Every structure is written in C-alpha cells, then in structure tokens.
C-alpha cells in the first residue's frame, strides 16, 4: 500500500468479543431427525422423543470436557464435577418440552464426574402427568460405548418432580441496588466463601468460567449481586440459563450459609425453580437464607425484568471418599501412557549447534538469532539444534513464572518455524521436570513448555524433539542426539519414552482392619466364603457373622474354628437384618468401630 495514503487502524473489537468462529467437537449430532428423533436447541441435550403412545418423554445428548469446556472450571478434590446447576438446567429444559416448565424439586443422588478423555451419554426422562399435573423427572448418564464394547451401566444423578405451574417470579425492587445497600468488594465476597466453606482446604476450586460476580452489595441479611457470563464459559445460546451463571448466582449467599464450624457442602436439592426467560448473560440476583442450610434466590435480567426464582436450595456435606468411590465405580479408560526404557542411541556424527549454556557437545551460539546470522555468513547449517527453555526468574508469582516461561517457549517455536535458513534442521528442546513419569509432580513453569512443543510436534512432524530430565546429573547427550524418539524423559540416568499401554481396569478395595466387619448371612455358604476371603486377602481381624439362626446354624462351629485358626476374632449373632429394631440393637452391642458391611443375606 505504499504511496496509496492507506493507514493502519485498530481492528474493531467489540463485535468479535461474543462470537466464536470454530466448531466445538462432538456438541450435537448432524441430524437427530434421521434417527426418528426430534431436535432440541440445547448445547447438551440435542434430541427428544415421545415414548410410543404414552405421555412420557426422553431427551438425550452427550457431555464431555471437550464439548463443554466450562465444566473444567468446577473442580472438587481435584476432580471435574458437573455442578448441580447443570442438572437443574437440563431438568428445566426437559420440563419445557413436556409442558411442565417448573422444577418443583430435584434431589442430587450421585455426583456427575467427567474424565479428561471420556464422553458420557446423557438421558433425561420425564414421566406421565399425575392427577396433580406433576411429572417425575430423572437425569441419567452412561459411559459412551467404544466400538463393540458392552454398554456401561447407567447412573442416576438427580431425580425429582416437574410441575405445570408454580409461584410466580416476584418483581424486582424498584431501585437497584436496593436502598441502603452497602457495597461488598467482589474479592472479599469470594474470601467469605472460601473462609466459611473451607473451599481451599476442602479441595473446591472455582475457575474463571464460574466467577461471574461483577458487583455485590449487602442489603440487611441478604446479598445482591450483578453477574455477567465470562467469555471463557462460552455461549449461552440454547441454555435456559447457562449452568456457570446459575451456579454463580449462589455465590453471594455461600458465605452466610457456611457458618464457622460447619462442614460446608455442595448443592443437594433444589425446590421451586422457575425460569421465565432464557438465554440471558447478565443477571441481577438477590440471595438470602431459607434456613441454616438452604438459600433462596430472586433473579432478574439486567433491565430489572423478573427472570427466575429458586424457592430453596439445600446443601449437604461432601467427602473426598464419596467422590472417589463414585469415580471408581464409573468406567475407566482401557489404555494409559506408560513410560518404558529405550536403548541409548549411537554417538552421532551429525552437525550439532547448541544455544545457551547447555553442556552439550557441538558448535555454541548465544541464541537462535546468533545461529541464523552465522548461517547467513556462510557457516554450515546444523542438522540438530539443542536449546533449553529456562524458567523465567524475574516473576515472583508461580502463575506469572509459568506464563512468562510459556511465552518464551512460544516465541522460540514461532521463530524456529519462521526460519528459512534452518528449515531442514531439527530443534531439540530440553526441559527439566516438565512431565510426570512416575509419581512425581511436574514443575509448574516447565510443564506448559512440554505441552506447547508437543502440540508443535503434531503440526510439524520431524521438526522437534522433547527431552525432559530430572536434574540428577548431566545426561549422556551423545546417547540422546541420535535417538529417533520424539519425546524422551531422563530419570536417574535411564532413558524413558511414552508408550500406549493397557490400563489397570480396577483397584482392589481397601478394608480398615482396625474395626470389625459385619457379614449378613454370615453362616451360609456365600457368607462363609466372604468371611474367609476377608481374613485371608484383606487381613481383617474381627468378624461379626449374622444370620437368622446365628449360633444354631449348621456348621457354625467348624466355620468359627477355621476363622480363628487364621487369626480372626469371630462373633456370631442371631438377627434378622430386615428387622430395623433388632439390627439397631445389634449395632449398639458392638464393641469398637465397624469398618465395613458385606451384605450376603
């Protein structure tokens, strides 16, 4: 444009802030009608069917971290937990399809956990209308089948009732924020939540997609907040209300709900949920206590128009063991990455250039620019260029160091790919403790470098090699330079490369051997088998064997003698476990803790 009078101008930004120009993988089937289903305009639930001639409905879809990346920002004890707000939103969607738009009640039965590379099928069932017009609703998932594998077992995550009518959404206050409102700093609001809910200690983590509160005020005993759906949460199109936004609507009240000394918890049941308008991305919320363990919410749009209400949202304590048990019960991947020993390469005769201070044999240059200049001046083009991406030292905050180090690696990769003079060479990038090979934790600032270069390897085969070492001595660079492995980890002098291996399908259960284990039906054939198994395989020392006949059952003497010979202390009791009062009396008679129950009756 020289000589034309053209000038550079800033690109318009606002129009592009809320538009996405790439496809989300696996969001919806190409055409649900081709399978005889009706379409649903929803990011998760994409098809609907009325069951035969019955007044019952089924909505189906798929859910994964890739398809719904906002789920990655709701972490509990290190696991991606789909928030209860998402189950509520799907139940409301199903209710609109079936003509019952009010969620009278939804009780969370089981946590919905997502693994990084897994997809689950989602089913929302809506039953026939009763005399009062209400319909039963339930939300299920099932692991998606792989090839010809047997379908996984379905899990019910939430069950409740839809209603055709409910209490109307109340009009918002005429003034916003209400008269007498005292501003609350948003960071202080989240500090309250963290303090009273013990979120940091308990392993809860709200990522950017779930931090939608922009302003907050204290109004008497209530809290008013203004919310805006973060860009990282994606589009609200198709949702009745985006789950990240609905979950964030609770945040103003969590600090007053979780009092000091309480156990905190997660949303457990939702009652009286009504949504008047869909697709909003900016909300006004007034939240207060329904009682000591429950919140109530009044929600309006940014213009003050009534939008939604939640009559009651109860919380219950959650333990890490509960989520881990739910995770183990779900289907696991059949394969995993194993790091295996690989033989060292032969000493190379290739021309090697070394950038920086690495103690690698070869021609040395200060940086990539220096190497390019040398080649321009007539030096031979190297076949292998070795460099390290050092952790940025100037930033004190770990997150800032990680960002600065990743930016340095990105600049290096881009510069390398842009270099015409070095287009036939291979760049060996050296990191330190950037990847977990065994049980170690990766170094925070170096891990992004490994991931970034790994991505570049897939886009530009043959142009990059990744070497990660543990800092335990200087690697044998001569053995590394000629390896044909794209990624290698050096651990205590051993060369390890990643391979796809068969995953361990399940982990054996652990039993607390400090307490007693009760076996119902314990004097029968199956109960006796389990009793011996508990003593032999799990080291259980105290057994309580229960059956209707108890000590009078056939073969009890021989069974007890056998178990005592194996080192166990055995008590046999007569009790019908279907009789609540007798079973309670049995529990109260136990000496010491009860570690487990095997129900074999």
Image (cartoon, rainbow, N blue to C red):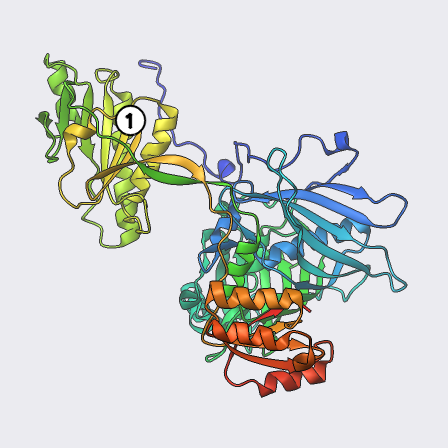
Q: Position of residue 491 (x, y in %)?
A: 23, 43
Q: Position of residue 88 (x, y in %)?
A: 66, 57
**Residue 595 appears in the picture as rendered:** no
Residue 111 as seen in the image, left or right of residue 79: right
Q: 470 and 48: which one is in front?
A: 470
Q: Is residue 204 above or below residue 383?
A: below
| Residue 259 appears in view | yes
Query: Residue 526 appears in which quarter of the rendering?
Result: bottom right
Residue 438: % across, % down: 32, 47
Q: Which residue is mark 1?
A: 464
Side of 1 relative to 356 (left or right): right
Where residue 421 sits: x, y (%)?
A: 21, 15
Residue visible at 33% across and 51% down? 439
Q: Nearer the viewer, residue 336 or 68?
A: 336
How packed mark 1 is, by other alpha carbons closer than 10 Å (few <14, some 14-19, many 20 or more), is many
Of residues 56 and 592, the one nearer the viewer is 592
Identify the element where label 1 is drawn.
strand
Q: Residue at x 34, y 28 (%)?
A: 457
Rendered residue at 29%/23% (across/down): 463
Quarter of the rendering containing residue 531: bottom right
Name the side, left or right, on which 179 lies relative to 337.
right
Q: Answer above or below: position of 304 versus 150.
A: below
Give the position of the C terminus as an image quadrant. Answer: bottom right
């Amino acid at each position: 444009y020289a000589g034309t009078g053209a000038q550079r101008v800033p690109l318009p930004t606002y129009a592009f802030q809320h538009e996405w120009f790439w496809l989300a993988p696996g969001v919806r089937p190409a055409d649900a009608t081709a399978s005889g289903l009706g379409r649903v305009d929803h990011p998760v639930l994409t098809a609907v069917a009325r069951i035969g001639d019955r007044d019952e409905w089924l909505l189906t879809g798929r859910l994964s971290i890739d398809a719904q990346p906002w789920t990655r920002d709701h972490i509990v004890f290190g696991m991606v937990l789909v928030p209860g707000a998402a189950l509520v939103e799907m139940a409301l969607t199903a209710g609109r399809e079936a003509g019952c738009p009010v969620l009278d009640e939804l009780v969370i039965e089981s946590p919905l956990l997502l693994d990084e590379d897994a997809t689950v099928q989602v089913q929302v069932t809506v039953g026939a209308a009763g005399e009062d017009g209400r319909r039963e609703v339930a939300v299920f998932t099932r692991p998606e089948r792989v090839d010809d594998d047997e379908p996984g077992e379905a899990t019910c995550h939430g069950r409740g009732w839809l209603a055709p009518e409910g209490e109307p959404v109340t009009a918002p206050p005429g003034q916003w924020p209400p008269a007498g409102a005292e501003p609350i700093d948003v960071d202080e609001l989240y500090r309250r939540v963290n303090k009273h809910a013990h979120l940091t200690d308990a392993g809860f983590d709200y990522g950017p997609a779930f931090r939608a509160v922009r302003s907050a005020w204290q109004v008497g005993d209530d809290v008013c907040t203004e919310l805006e759906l973060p860009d990282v949460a994606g589009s609200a199109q198709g949702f009745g209300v985006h789950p990240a936004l609905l979950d964030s609507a609770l945040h103003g009240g969590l600090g007053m709900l979780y009092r000091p000394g309480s156990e905190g918890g997660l949303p457990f049941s939702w009652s009286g949920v009504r949504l008047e308008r869909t697709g909003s991305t900016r909300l006004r919320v007034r939240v207060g206590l329904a009682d000591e363990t429950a919140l109530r919410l009044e929600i309006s749009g940014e213009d003050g128009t009534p939008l939604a209400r939640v009559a009651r949202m109860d919380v219950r304590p959650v333990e890490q063991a509960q989520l881990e048990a739910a995770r183990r019960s779900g289907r696991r991947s059949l394969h995993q990455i194993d790091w295996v020993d690989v033989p060292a390469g032969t000493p190379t005769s290739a021309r090697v250039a070394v950038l920086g201070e690495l103690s690698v044999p070869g021609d040395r240059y200060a940086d990539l620019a220096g190497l390019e200049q040398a080649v321009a001046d007539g030096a031979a083009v190297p076949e292998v260029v070795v460099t390290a991406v050092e952790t940025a030292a100037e930033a004190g905050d770990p997150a800032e160091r990680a960002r600065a180090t990743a930016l340095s690696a990105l600049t290096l990769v881009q510069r390398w790919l842009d270099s015409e003079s070095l287009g036939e060479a291979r760049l060996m990038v050296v990191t330190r403790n950037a990847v977990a090979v065994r049980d170690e934790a990766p170094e925070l600032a170096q891990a992004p470098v490994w991931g970034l270069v790994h991505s570049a390897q897939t886009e530009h085969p043959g142009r990059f090699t990744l070497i990660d070492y543990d800092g335990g001595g200087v690697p044998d660079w001569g053995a590394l330079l000629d390896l044909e492995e794209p990624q290698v980890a050096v651990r205590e002098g051993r060369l390890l490369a990643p391979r796809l291996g068969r995953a361990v399908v399940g982990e054996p259960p652990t039993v607390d051997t400090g307490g007693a284990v009760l076996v119902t039906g314990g004097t029968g054939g199956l109960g006796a088998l389990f009793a011996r198994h508990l003593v032999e395989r799990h080291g259980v020392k105290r057994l309580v064997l229960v059956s209707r006949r108890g000590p009078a059952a056939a073969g009890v003497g021989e069974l007890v003698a056998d178990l005592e010979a194996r080192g166990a202390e055995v008590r046999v009791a007569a009790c019908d476990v279907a009789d609540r009062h007798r079973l309670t009396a049995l529990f109260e008679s136990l000496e010491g803790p009860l570690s487990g129950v095997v129900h074999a009756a």
